[in-house]
């Protein structure tokens, strides 16, 4: 388990690391950059860099944790990548089920495979399932997510790359929005964010605005810390009611 600066969670757990690009949101993948950096630093776990790698030895980590945490599963990978066998995902789900004191946040860009997996399996009650929706082209992922019988379904609109228009939110319990960071970051416009926020409000869905990223609310490129996380003059970081 690792501490994290990701604001909507507090711990990460990576029984899988590495991935391959799936859609436009992957273009400037933070995890790929970090994995290469960790490899250069000599960290054994990242000796393969960003090549997909399964870490059986990390499966027992959650049994050692004290307290109760929000845990981002595979922050350095995609658990539902085609090269992760369902048999290994079964092992991950067993750990999740056996540690009910934690809430596990599982985010994927491979919604079809996640739906396929859960067609024959029960979602642990402490597993939150989410999909990344960065632009119009991938809105189909929402339907695959909504078909799964989970307690919490969530959308991560990060990096938000364009106006998403109308979203199908009938079975969504949480929405996260954020801009892209890094020197190659693509800008996010305030009106795109506000349209999602309004839809969340109308549907009584908690809305979590993470950050502006490298491009500020005023359209100026600068350090993401300076750009901050205010939307309409305030911090809005809501969570689902459990």
Image (cartoon, rainbow, N blue to C red):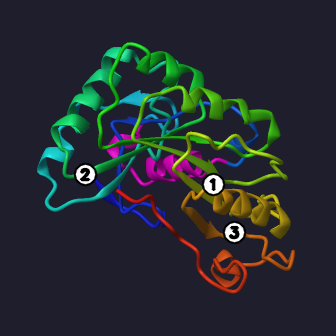
- Magenta stretch holds residue 36: yes
Task: From this view, report whether residue 113 is shown above or below residue 152.
Answer: above
Please name the residue that numbered disc 1 is placed on.
203
* Left/right of residue 7 with respect to residue 58 in the rendered view: right
Looking at the figure, which quarter contains the C terminus? Answer: bottom left
Where is residue 141 shown, x and y percent of the image? 65, 31
Which of marks 2 and 3 precedes in the sequence? Answer: 2
> Residues under labels 1 and 3: Cα distance?
26 Å
| Contact, mark 1 vs mark 2 (Cβ under 8 Å) | no
> Residues under labels 3 and 2: Cα distance?
29 Å
Q: Is residue 180 visible?
A: no
The residue segment tinted magenta is 29-47
Please name the residue that numbered disc 3 is placed on.
213
Residue drawn at 65 percent across, 58 percent down: 200
Please name the residue that numbered disc 2 is placed on.
102
Where is residue 30 shown, x and y percent of the image? 60, 52
Residue drawn at 40 percent across, 63 percent down: 4
Which of marks 3 and 1 precedes in the sequence? Answer: 1
For the residue labelled by badge 3, is the local secondary structure a helix, a strand or a loop? loop
Task: From this view, report whether residue 107 is shown above or below residue 210.
Answer: above
| Contact, mark 1 vs mark 3 (Cβ under 8 Å) | no
Q: Is residue 165 visible?
A: yes
Number of labelled discs? 3
Viewer-proximal residue among 112 and 179 = 112
Viewer-proximal residue among 49 and 145 = 145
* Left/right of residue 236 with respect to residue 116 in the rendered view: right
For the residue labelled by badge 2, is the local secondary structure a helix, a strand or a loop? loop
Main structural element of the magenta stretch: helix, strand or loop? helix
Viewer-proximal residue among 21 and 195 = 195
Task: From this view, report whether residue 70 is shown above or below residue 137.
Answer: below
């Amino acid at each position: 388990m690792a501490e994290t600066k990701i604001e909507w969670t507090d711990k990460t757990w990576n029984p899988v690391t590495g991935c391959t690009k799936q859609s436009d949101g992957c273009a400037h993948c933070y995890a790929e950059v970090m994995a290469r950096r960790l490899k250069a630093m000599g960290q054994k776990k990242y000796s393969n860099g960003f090549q997909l790698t399964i870490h059986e030895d990390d499966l027992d980590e959650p049994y050692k944790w004290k307290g109760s945490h929000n845990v981002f599963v595979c922050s350095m990978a995609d658990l539902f990548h085609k090269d992760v066998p369902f048999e290994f995902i079964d092992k991950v789900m067993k750990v999740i089920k056996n540690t009910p004191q934690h809430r596990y946040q599982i985010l994927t860009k491979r919604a079809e495979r996640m739906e396929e997996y859960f067609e024959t399996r029960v979602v642990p009650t402490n597993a939150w399932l989410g999909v990344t929706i960065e632009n119009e082209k991938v809105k189909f992922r929402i339907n695959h997510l909504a078909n799964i019988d989970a307690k919490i379904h969530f959308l991560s609109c990060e990096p938000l790359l364009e106006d998403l228009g109308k979203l199908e939110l009938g079975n969504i319990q949480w929405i996260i929005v954020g801009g892209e960071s890094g020197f190659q970051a693509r800008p996010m416009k305030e009106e795109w964010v506000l349209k999602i926020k309004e839809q969340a409000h109308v549907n009584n869905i908690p809305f979590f605005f993470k950050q502006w990223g490298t491009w500020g609310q005023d359209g100026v490129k600068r350090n993401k810390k300076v750009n901050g996380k205010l939307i309409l003059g305030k911090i809005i970081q809501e969570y689902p009611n459990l």
